[in-house]
Image (cartoon, rainbow, N blue to C red):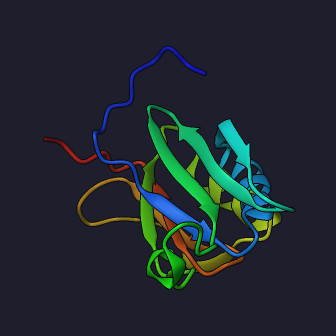
Amino acid sequence: MSDNPLIADLVPTLRYNDATAAITFLREAFGMTAVMVVPGDGDTVAHAELTFGNAMVMLGSNLPEGGGDRLRWPVGGSALYGVIDGDVDAHCARAVAAGATVVLEPKDQDYGGRGYTVRDPEGNLWSFGGYRPKV
């Protein structure tokens, strides 16, 4: 685990039908680092934490553990944005090579920065770009 504190007090949480494959995809496509993976029953993931810079996403297998259907939700309905300081076009190419589907090609944005949007294999939207929102 990293000793670096997160910059946000709100951590997005995702569910995947195949959380193990999602972790591999997020590492290969976007360069995320899995800092914790807690196996569940069978081939499931009870809990995982992946970092991206000073941010984090948590994820797990889409199972009704403990709460029945109340804790199960449709996968693929999330959208996240990540700030990158490097080459946006190269980052997009890496994502596509790992299996992402391009939704919006890299382009310069009117509000600043250059960005793109892809869909992961289970339908979530991931946008990355050089625009860094300010508080």
Q: Residue at x 52, y 64 (%)?
A: 14
Looking at the picture, how far across and down is residue 124, in whole percent? Answer: 55, 75
Q: Residue at x 34, y 50 (%)?
A: 131
Classify residue 17 as left or right of residue 20: left
Q: Residue at x 62, y 59 (%)?
A: 60
* Quadrant the N terminus occupies: top right
Front residue (pair 23, 32): 23
Q: Residue at x 30, y 38 (%)?
A: 8
The outermost residue toward the left is 135
Looking at the picture, how far across and down is residue 20, in whole percent? Answer: 79, 59
Front residue (pair 34, 30): 34
**Image height of 61 relative to 82, above or below:** below
Classify residue 32 as left or right of residue 133: right
Looking at the picture, how far across and down is residue 9, in whole percent? Answer: 28, 39
Looking at the picture, how far across and down is residue 89, in whole percent? Answer: 61, 57
Front residue (pair 124, 110): 124
**Image height of 64 relative to 92, above or below:** below
Front residue (pair 22, 69): 69
* Quadrant the C terminus occupies: top left
The outermost residue toward the right is 42
Name the image quarter holding residue 66: bottom right
Name the image quarter holding residue 102: bottom right
